[in-house]
Amino acid sequence: MFRIFAVSLLMSGVLLLGEEPKAAKLAAPEDWGGETIALPPGFAPDMKLKGFEHIRFAPGMMKPASDSFFCYAFVFELQPKPELTDAVVKEEFLKYFRGLCKTVLNGKLPDVDPAEFTLELQRAKSDTAPAANEKAADVPTQYAGTLNWVEPFATQKPQKLNLEIRTWARNDRNYVFACVSPQARDAAIWKQLHAIRDDYLKKPAK
């Protein structure tokens, strides 16, 4: 089921479940799973970002044969510091995925070195025009990225993940929204990921 991601981390003793306000939950189809964890997470304590992560998992999240294998969307709701520069975003995402893999594998594959994981991240052109009353600081910064890592849950094999990331600051808080999938960017799953993201972006700032 969808909680396998969380259960795997609970077995490692590192998942920090937080009280997820109903207003903060990400809207998604009924067959999508969801969790909330505290940041920095137990599996990546060296992350500088502090706050909460709200996650929605596609039905095939842990099914390698599925078109939605390892497809999910998440948002970080963060304290105002550190500033979300390009370097910080890249560094924090690498810490997150490296820590996740290391914790889940727990020494099962000694030849896997998370330090060798790479993330190519580039700023992307916005596909939406800013609202008339939107301040420049509120306009999201967009990134397109490719993460090369070892998927630790179901296959324990090298995997290339495509990431679409948006960051913005509002009301003394920082936000990071990410859509993640190994599927090509024109695959159908991206429409569902974008729908979750766009619904969240429409919600009033908290």
Image (spheres, helix red, strand yellow):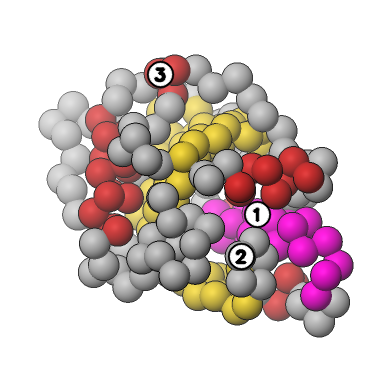
Is residue 178 among what the camera can see?
A: no
Query: Percent position (x, y) of residue 184?
Result: 32, 73
Q: Which residue is mark 1?
A: 96
Instruction: Give me the residue at 29% from left, 58% from top.
Output: 190
How far apart marks 3 and 2 lie (CA) works out to 32 Å
Query: Which tag, 3 or 1, sits closer to the chain's start?
Result: 3
Q: Is residue 193 above or below residue 147?
A: above
Helix, strand or loop at label 1? It is helix
Amino acid type shown at disc 2: Ala
Q: How many marks?
A: 3
Would you say 44 lies left or right of 145 here?
right
Query: Percent position (x, y) of residue 160?
Result: 50, 75
**Camera-nearest residue between 88 and 159:** 159
Query: Percent position (x, y) of residue 197?
Result: 32, 42
Q: Which residues are magenta?
A: 89-109
Amino acid type shown at disc 3: Ala
Would you say 61 lies left or right of 16 here?
left
Q: Is residue 125 magenta?
A: no
Q: Which mark is residue 154?
A: 2
